[in-house]
Image (cartoon, helix red, strand yellow):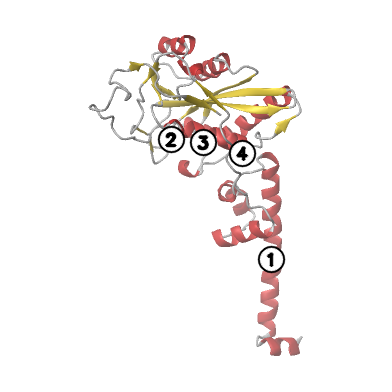
């Protein structure tokens, strides 16, 4: 051993200290990987930054401190970094003659729950055919406050999701409901439910994905991180998987912009407890001298563009 230390240019004491450090780091990394793999069993594609924030308490109790670079190094060597999935093309476009509404939230700044809801609809694939998932999300807390999975692409499923959201809405609160201009959200029955509770009605006007990016994002998280974008064996199976994904998303998935808190916690917080705010995209102002293809200034108008669904 003395000969090895002399060749390495280090003292025997330094050699043993280095070996103990490596052994300790190896033990720490094994503990980290065990915790990460445990969480990944529930949330298979949860990002490593969120995992670091989520597991910080347990690692602290074990006396383990890993900096950002070392954390990423451990995840990389273990093959646990999440690879981005490619975007899928939209497959359905619809045209209808129902009334549509102006975008009331563009440029709007919000800082608490129950100010703005965003809604969207997507498909899920099974061997028994497609099912369709509707979601309503609080734009501030990112909590999914209403959802439904059903066999029909018609408005009924969206109305069920809206009903769940309305059930949890505190008395006196009247958020703006924002969606794209799909017929599911423009139909008389859906609009009437919003009006009965005094909710403002807001819809995308031009760049539909951009103007409804928050709802598009949560759909992407559910399908991408919770592996709902594959093919399920049965419709009943995908319905159970979607419900579990919503539970995990609301109660266990931390958000960077929520100071790594989970949506359910932020949704119940008082104004000011969580720093920051959400500002919706502000598109260019409509040119009043443009041809009549531009939207008029009235709230209610006829549709001039297509509404797309995923």
Q: CA distance from mark 2 to mark 3?
A: 10 Å
In front: label 1 or label 3: 3
Residue linked to disc 2: 210
- Image quadrant where one finds the C terminus: top right
Q: Residues within 10 Å of mark 1 (few under 14, many from 20)?
A: few
Residues 68 and 170: in front is 68
Residue linked to disc 4: 224
Residue linked to disc 3: 217
Of labels 1 and 4, earlier in sequence is 1
Residue that extends furthest to the front in the rendered view of this protein: 291
Q: Which mark is residue 281?
A: none
In front: label 2 or label 4: 2
Q: Are marks 1 and 4 in contact (CB under 8 Å)?
A: no
Residue linked to disc 1: 24
Q: Are marks 2 and 4 in contact (CB under 8 Å)?
A: no
Q: CA distance from mark 2 to mark 1?
A: 48 Å
Dividing the picture into quarters, in which one does residue 157 lie? Answer: top right
In front: label 1 or label 4: 4
Q: Residues within 10 Å of mark 4 (few under 14, many from 20)?
A: some
> What secondary structure is marked by label 1?
helix
In front: label 2 or label 1: 2
């Amino acid at each position: 051993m003395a000969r090895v230390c002399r060749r390495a240019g280090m003292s025997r004491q330094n050699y043993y200290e280095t070996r103990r450090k490596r052994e300790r780091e190896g033990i720490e990394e094994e503990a980290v990987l065990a915790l990460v793999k445990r969480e990944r069993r529930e949330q298979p594609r949860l990002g490593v930054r969120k995992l670091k924030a989520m597991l910080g308490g347990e690692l602290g109790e074990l006396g383990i401190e890993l900096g950002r670079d070392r954390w990423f190094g451990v995840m990389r060597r273990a093959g646990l970094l999440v690879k981005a999935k490619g975007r899928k093309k939209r497959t359905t476009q619809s045209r209808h003659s129902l009334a549509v509404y102006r975008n009331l939230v563009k440029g709007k700044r919000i800082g608490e729950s129950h100010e703005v809801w965003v809604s969207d609809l997507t498909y899920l694939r099974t061997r028994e055919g497609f099912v369709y998932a509707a979601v309503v999300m609080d734009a501030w807390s990112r909590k999914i406050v209403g959802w439904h999975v059903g066999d029909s692409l018609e408005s009924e499923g969206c109305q069920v999701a809206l009903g769940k959201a309305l059930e949890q809405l505190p008395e006196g609160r009247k958020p703006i409901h924002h969606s794209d201009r799909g017929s599911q959200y423009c139909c008389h029955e859906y609009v009437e439910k919003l009006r009965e509770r005094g909710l403002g009605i807001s819809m995308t006007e031009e760049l539909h994905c951009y103007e409804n990016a928050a709802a598009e994002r949560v759909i992407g998280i559910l399908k991408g991180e919770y592996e709902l974008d594959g093919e399920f064996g049965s419709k009943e199976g995908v319905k159970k998987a979607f419900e579990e994904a919503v539970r995990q998303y609301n109660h266990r998935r931390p958000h960077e912009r929520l100071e790594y808190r989970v949506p359910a916690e932020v949704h119940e917080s008082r104004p000011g407890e969580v720093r920051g705010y959400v500002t919706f995209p502000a598109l260019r102002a409509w040119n009043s001298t443009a041809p009549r293809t531009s939207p008029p200034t009235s709230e209610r108008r006829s549709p001039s563009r297509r509404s797309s669904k995923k």
